Image (spheres, rainbow, N blue to C red):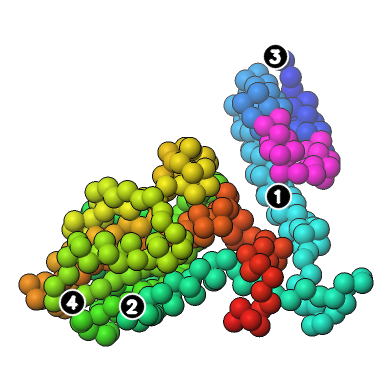
Amino acid sequence: MSGQSKDQILEQIAGLKNEMQESIAAASSAEALQDLKVRFLGKKGTLTGILKGLASLSGEDRGAVGKTANELKLWYEGANEKKEGELRAARMASLATEEFIDLTPLPSGLVMGDSPARPGTLHPTTILQRELEQIFTKMGFAIADGPEVETDFYNFEALNFTDDHPAREMQDTFYTKDGTLLRTHTSSVQVRTLQKNGAPLRIVAPGRVYRYEEIDASHEHTFYQMEGMVIDKKVNVANLLYLMQTLLKEVFRRKVTVRLRPGYFPFVEPGFELDMQCEICKGKGCAVCKHSGWVEVLPCGLVHPNVIRLAGFDPNEWQGAAFGLGLTRLVMLRYGIEDIRLQMNPDIQFASQFTRGIQLQEAL
Ligand code: DAH
């Protein structure tokens, strides 16, 4: 390594630049570029090797060659970045063509091959939601609604989750850049509706909710719940249980096996978990019930006095019962759907299995 002249080293640097130029031009992926960077500029890279030869030069020559080497390094980094940008743009362009989906709707009544176009069908979630709405309307409940992009106040704070409340960790939340969030539960309609409509109140609020979840057979980032709330002058656990039993009897149209466990939710006290024996495996254990034989369907409880107070009412005067029905989960249980991910599947073949021949017109 010793004994190289300044000119020899400069020549090596010039040679290296050519090699770099050609290699960058030939690189066809971000990984290839990364490998090149290691090869040229890494600890054991070519440039580093060349620079080791500087030791044999005089101070002045070393300065001059060092400067050239430095310039080469800067040039390389610029060229590398430019190429990275080009590769990225090329990738985007190819995605746009390779993964193009034609969203142009087919003209209605189009005949495909010999078979006439299939009529639309209602999604099982819609079927069950409408059924539940009817059951509750008969019991004197109103249907309430609330926004899916919600404030921290209605989703958490008004429901007795304090800022540092560990229970906030129970639900992984999607936040937006401006500080709002995608509601993690339909409980967010509780205080909204109470403030708007006042007490006494009986509502159910079906809707879509979002969680930042790892997706598997029983977890989705987007699913449906139906919140229920009764606010009146005297509400107790017996009222709550009667409501829950009536509901399940109507949904399953037969006796279902349930169990009640204490459950913790900041906005109810006492709080319960109502579990139903898994309909899919009949209690034997499967992926849906996480091999426990039971599925949580109805967390519920008596509305916490703080929630009533935060909505502007006197908890000594008004009490409440609430439940958060897992609509998506209930659909799975009722229809024996083993994988929650199927429910977000836009394939009409999936949805059409549940109407059992009912045409859209009739179902509506
Ligand atoms: N909001 C809760 C959740 O999504 C469910 C819930 C639990 C709702 C208890 C309630 C309740 O109204 O009383 O996890």
Q: Assess whether mark 3 and mark 1 are in contact (beta carbons under 8 angstroms).
A: no
x, y percentage for residue 253?
Answer: 46, 63
Q: CA distance from mark 1 to mark 3?
A: 37 Å
Checking the image for residue 165, the label placed there is none
Q: Which residue, given by chain and number where applicable, does mark 4 sit on?
A: 232
Which numbered mark, 1 or 3, is in the foreground of this view? Answer: 1
Position of residue 306 in the picture relative to residue 250 (left or right): left
Q: Residues within 10 Å of mark 4 (few under 14, many from 20)?
A: some
- Which tag, 1 or 3, sits closer to the chain's start? 3
Q: Which residue, given by chain and number where applicable, does mark 2 sit on?
A: 139
Q: Which residue: 79% across, 42% down? A: 27
x, y percentage for residue 181?
Answer: 40, 66
Q: CA distance from mark 4 to mark 1?
A: 64 Å
Residue 22 in which image quadrant: top right
Q: Assess whether mark 4 and mark 2 are in contact (beta carbons under 8 angstroms).
A: no
- Which tag, 4 or 1, sits closer to the chain's start? 1
Q: Which residue, given by chain and number where applicable, does mark 3 sit on?
A: 2
Q: Residues within 10 Å of mark 2 (few under 14, many from 20)?
A: few
Which numbered mark, 2 or 3, is in the foreground of this view? Answer: 2
Is residue 75 visible in the rendered structure shown here? no
Q: Which residue: 26% across, 53% down? A: 272
Identify the amino acid type marked 4.
Asp
Q: Secondary structure at mark 3?
A: loop
**Where is the C terminus found, in terms of image quarters?**
bottom right
Identify the amino acid type marked 3.
Ser
| Magenta span of residues | 19-40
Q: Secondary structure at mark 1?
A: helix
